[in-house]
Amino acid sequence: MEIFSKEYDPFMCLPMVFCPEMVGRTDVKQGILCSLVNPIDTNIGKSRRRRERIHILLYGTVGTGKTIPLEYLSQSWGAIYISADPSAATLKGDARRANKGVQVFRAYNGGIVCIDDIELMKDVDAIRDVMESGKYTLDKGGVHEEYEAQCRVIAATNDIESISPAIMSRFDLIYGFDTPDVSESISIAKNLLEIDELGHDIELNYEFIESYIKIASQFVPQKENKEEIMDIMSQTFNKVGGRTGRWTASVYRIARAIAKMRMKPMGPMEVAKAIDMKCESDTVIGLL
């Protein structure tokens, strides 16, 4: 694994064999791999920790392929897949429900929760604390209980405007999906035609990715060239305007994930790429 990370750039190579059902969209695959490599937050002091978990939102109309990654994560990476049935979608802690409401996040502490049609959930704001702090509380009958829920949320939506700003601000990366054009449709048709024939090779590739992600997730990248990093950040703010601390923390979080994938220190290259990814997200939601 170490030889691979030195000879190749895993951040560029792994998306080539990750989620083979999704043709193209290297950007989405890179974002999801960043999320996979950052499973839990980092303790930075007494009773303090820094969020490392990367949350992703996929946005597009029906049939544009945004749920393909959710299904892949569910089938191959042990994620839970929640479909937001508008007649029953709720995340309140009701033990009578099959998914036991927010308790699903406790069960998937350290794991991935995929939510399709997240905008249809009646009380989606219930996951706000889960996304930010990795914890949630239940108050019932005068009893206050707090649970660990360090989950990564990968969600899909048809209606981005229905999601509250509080939830939107906690998604690190947002990707837009459009109806494929003719050339993309041809690529998709070819890929689906050949995917079964390549099944054995894909399985071997999956096993390699799984092993690599496990090792990379344990890697702790140091920072290097801090002055160059600050120059890049300053140039970015001069170009796009001021950004909140939450936005900047998200950039560094993504940059650390890229460094972990490369098993190298976090430097200017990782920060510059993270800024590009973050600005693309801003374009999707109309901030740029």
Image: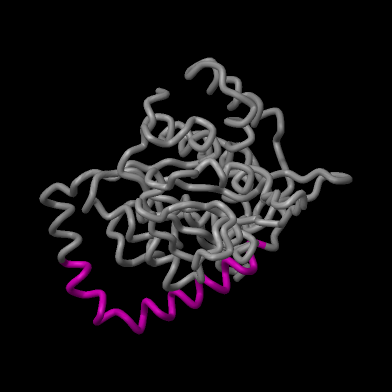
Please tell me in which quadrant of the rendered image residue 44 appears. top right
Position in image of residue 83 (x %, y %):
38, 59
Is the stretch drawn in magenta largely helix, strand or loop? helix
Q: Is residue 56 above or below residue 9?
A: above
Q: Residue furthest bottom?
A: 200
- The residue at the point 64 percent across, 35 percent down is 249
* Magenta segment includes 233: no
- The residue at the point 51 percent across, 37 percent down is 167
Q: Residue furthest left?
A: 182
As rendered, which of 223 and 287 lies closer to the eye? 287
Q: Residue furthest front?
A: 141
- The residue at the point 36 percent across, 50 percent down is 117
* Magenta segment includes 195: yes
As rendered, which of 124 and 51 lies closer to the eye? 124
As rendered, which of 21 and 108 lies closer to the eye? 108
Position in image of residue 211 (x %, y %):
57, 74
Horizontal side of 181 relative to 71 (left or right) equals left
